[in-house]
Image (spheres, rainbow, N blue to C red):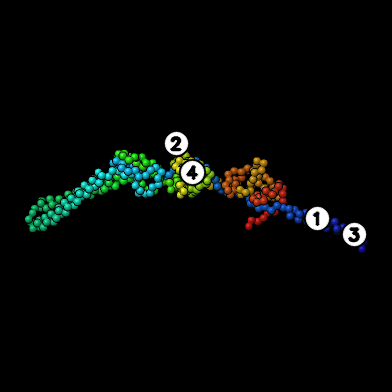
Amino acid sequence: MLVLCGCNGSAAPEEAAEAAGGDRLASALSTAVRVKVAQAVFADVQQEAAVSGMAEAFRKSTVAAEVSGRVISRLVEPGDHVTKGQKLILLDSERAGIAKNEAEARMQSAEVNLAEARSELKRGENLYAREFISEGTLDSMRFAVQRGISELAAANASLAAASRALKDTTIRAPFHGIAELIHVQEGDYLNPGLPIATIADFSSIRIRAGVTAREATLLAGTETASLTLEALGAQPLTGRVHSVARIADPSTGTYAVEIWLDDDRQLVREGMLATVYLPYASQEQHLTVPASAVFRRNGTMHAFVVTDDRAELRPVRTGRSDAIQVEVLEGLAEGEAVVTEGQFALRDGAMVRIERRG
């Protein structure tokens, strides 16, 4: 009995120590901060080139006089919306109308003369077959028909020109847009080539900007760009990258980029200053982590690195970033696990419990 009592007395402290260790482990596990992690990996970093540009009308046309004449009516004013084919200016058409009537009369006369010459030729061919007229006389009849054909062609051309001149006394809009400028007043006498009106199409907007040679190369294949217009505040807009020039502007050394922007609400005005953000992928891979893994503390960027279920607060130096990932220049190695969720409940050296991503 004494032996048994001695054995029981020596086992009790070992069992108590084991139980105490288990309690400490359970307590540590219960206080471990639940976190989610991601590995630092080499990847492309989406970058942006922020460049200044200026808004222009999608297209613009200065309508000029095709014929001479006096302005008898100005039908639109600057700022008016116009549709394709809409009348803008009317010129005095009296002389053009008379010229067209005369051309029609000449054409009718030429048609009659040609018909008579053909009839004479047909009669002459019958007479020549019966040897009533000479071959020379028949040749004269054939020449008369050819002359009649030439005269009719000339009369047709004159009529077409006269008709066009009469039509050109009404100046029309070449496309849908806004009458930006009207250069003439009623009573002005116009000569061919004189500017009459400037029509601008603002259904879409062109934003022109300049980029460096490296940016121009990286932008190849880029389809969209975000931009802001100074006059419209910080409202973000999205445009289509239409073209990137292959030849630099000799005066600036930059390559022209053209962005097309739909403007259904007609908010944009020509000359507005724009800041264009052109995205492109870097041609080199960089060590990156999710953007949520880094944060600023005491003026320095930090990340929590997890090793053996403990979080280490580590300063890092970051580079370029986008909404998804950030480039890490110093402080991390490839493959290290960084906390992406739960880091704001951590302190340096705290135990963590890693949760699997659902």
- Please tell me whether mark 3 or mark 2 is closer to you in this view: 2
Q: Nearer the viewer, residue 20 or 2?
A: 20
- SS label for mark 4: helix
Q: Is residue 107 left or right of residue 317?
A: left
Tell which circle, 3 or 4, labels the residue nearer the N-terminal end. 3
Task: Please name the residue that numbered disc 1 is placed on.
Answer: 20
Q: Nearer the viewer, residue 218 or 227?
A: 227
Contact, CB < 8 Å: mark 2 with mark 4? no
- Please tell me whether mark 3 or mark 4 is closer to you in this view: 4
Q: Residue at x 78, y 55 (%)?
A: 23
- SS label for mark 2: loop
**Residue most extreme to the bottom:** 1
Task: Please name the residue that numbered disc 4 is placed on.
Answer: 216
The percent coordinates of residue 50 (x first, y second) are 52, 42
Task: Please name the residue that numbered disc 2 is placed on.
Answer: 251
Tell which circle, 1 or 4, labels the residue nearer the N-terminal end. 1
Q: CA distance from mark 3 to mark 4?
A: 88 Å
The percent coordinates of residue 150 (x first, y second) are 19, 49
Tell which circle, 3 or 2, labels the residue nearer the N-terminal end. 3
Q: Nearer the viewer, residue 111 or 196?
A: 196
- SS label for mark 1: helix
Q: Residue at x 57, y 47 (%)?
A: 322
Q: Is residue 317 left or right of residue 194?
A: right
- The residue type indicated by label 2 comes to Ser
- The residue type indicated by label 4 comes to Ala
| Label 3 environment density (alpha carbons within 10 Å; few <14, some 14–19, many ≥20) | few
